Amino acid sequence: MIQFQEETAADAFFWNNSLVPPDTQKTRFENFNLKGLSDSQQDAFRKLKWYAENFGNWGDFDSLLLQGNYGIGKSHLSHSVAQHVKSLRKNVIFANTKMLLRKIRNSYGDSKETEAHILKNIESCELLVLDDLGAEYVRKDKDGEESWAADLILTIIESREDKPNIITTNYNVESLQSKYGTHGGRIISRMMPGTRVVKFTGEDRRIKGGGNSAWNQG
Ligand SMILES: Nc1ncnc2c1ncn2[C@@H]1O[C@H](COP(=O)(O)OP(=O)(O)OP(=O)(O)O)[C@@H](O)[C@H]1O
Ligand SMILES: [Mg+2]
C-alpha cells in the first residue's frame, strides 16, 4: 500500500532552500550500509546518528566538521542527519557549497530570489549543512586574494556562529585556511569553536561502485 505523508512546513522549507546533489538526495541512515567499512567510517556513522537523535542536547559542542577523502559517506551521513532533523519539524538547509555559490551569483539581478533572502534563511535555520566546503572554485583576483567566494563563505560562517552546523570537506583545517587567503584565518576562527571534528577514511564508494544501487544491497 502506498502511504502519502502530509508535507510539513519543515519539508517545504527544506526543499525551497536546499541544494542537494543528485547522488545524495535519497541517502538516509537506513540505506547506509555498514558492511566492509573501515572502523573510522563505522565510528562516523554512530556519531552522526547520535548527533541527529540527540538534536540540541549535545553538551559542550553544537557543530560537526566531517573530514575525509572522496566517496566515503560524508554527504550521505550529513544528509541523513538533515532528513532526520527535518522530520522533527525543524527548519534545516542542506547546501552543497558550489551549488549555493552558483545560486547566489545567479540571484544578482533577480528581484524574486535575492541574495539577502537566501542569506536570511541560511542565517535563521535551525541546522545548516554546508556540504563540500573547499571544492568550489575560488578565483584569485590580481592581488592573489580569493575575494568573492571567500567573502560569502565568511558572511555565512559569521551568521552561523553559535548555531548548529555540519560542514563536510576533503580538506584539513590548515588547507581550508590557506585556500581562503586573507579571509582564511577569520573563517576558521569563527568556524571551529563548538565544533567537533569527525575525521574518517575509507574506500571511495564511487570508484568501487555501490552507492544505493540494487546490485549492491544486502
Ligand atoms: N556505507 C554506504 N552505504 C551505502 N551507500 C554509500 C555508503 N557510503 C557511500 N555511499 C554512497 O556512495 C556515494 C558517495 O558517497 P558520498 O557522496 O557520501 O561521499 P563523500 O564522502 O561525500 O565524497 P566527496 O568528498 O567526494 O563529496 C553516494 O551515492 C552515497 O550514497
Ligand atoms: Mg560529498
Image (cartoon, rainbow, N blue to C red):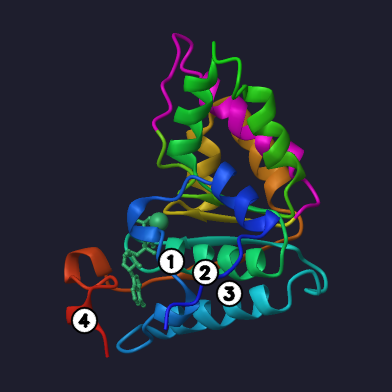
The amino acid beneath tag 1 is His
Q: Which residue is mark 3?
A: 48
Q: Is residue 8 magenta?
A: no
Q: Are marks 2 and 1 in contact (CB under 8 Å)?
A: yes
User: Sequence-wise, which precedes: disc 4 or disc 1?
Assistant: 1
The answer to which of marks 3 and 4 sits earlier in the sequence is 3
- Residues in magenta? 137-163
Instruction: Work out whether 46 lies above or below 149.
Output: below
Distance between the Cα atoms at labels 4 and 2? 19 Å
Q: CA distance from mark 3 to mark 4?
A: 23 Å
The residue where tag 2 is placed is: 80
Q: Helix, strand or loop at disc 1? A: helix
| Callout 3 amino acid | Leu
Residue 8 relative to residue 107: left or right: right
Q: Position of residue 141 (x, y in %)?
A: 45, 13
Q: Where residue 216 is drawn, which disc sits there?
A: 4
Q: Residue 76's mark?
A: 1
Is the residue at mark 1 in contact range of ligand 1, meaning its CB lies under 8 Å from it? yes
Under circle 3, the secondary element is helix
User: Would you call the spot at circle 4 few (<14 residues within 10 Å), some (14-19), or many (20 or more)?
Assistant: few
Residue 146 horizontal/vertical position (percent): 49, 22
Whole-number angstrom distance, CA of label 3 to CA of label 1: 10 Å
Ligand 1 within 8 Å of disc 3? The answer is no
Q: How many marks?
A: 4
**In the displayed structure image, the side of residue 48 where residue 10 appears, left or right:** right
From mark 4 to mark 1, how far is it between C-alphas? 16 Å
Residue drawn where x is 55% and y is 49% of the image: 15
Q: Mark 3 vs mark 2: give the one in front.
A: 2
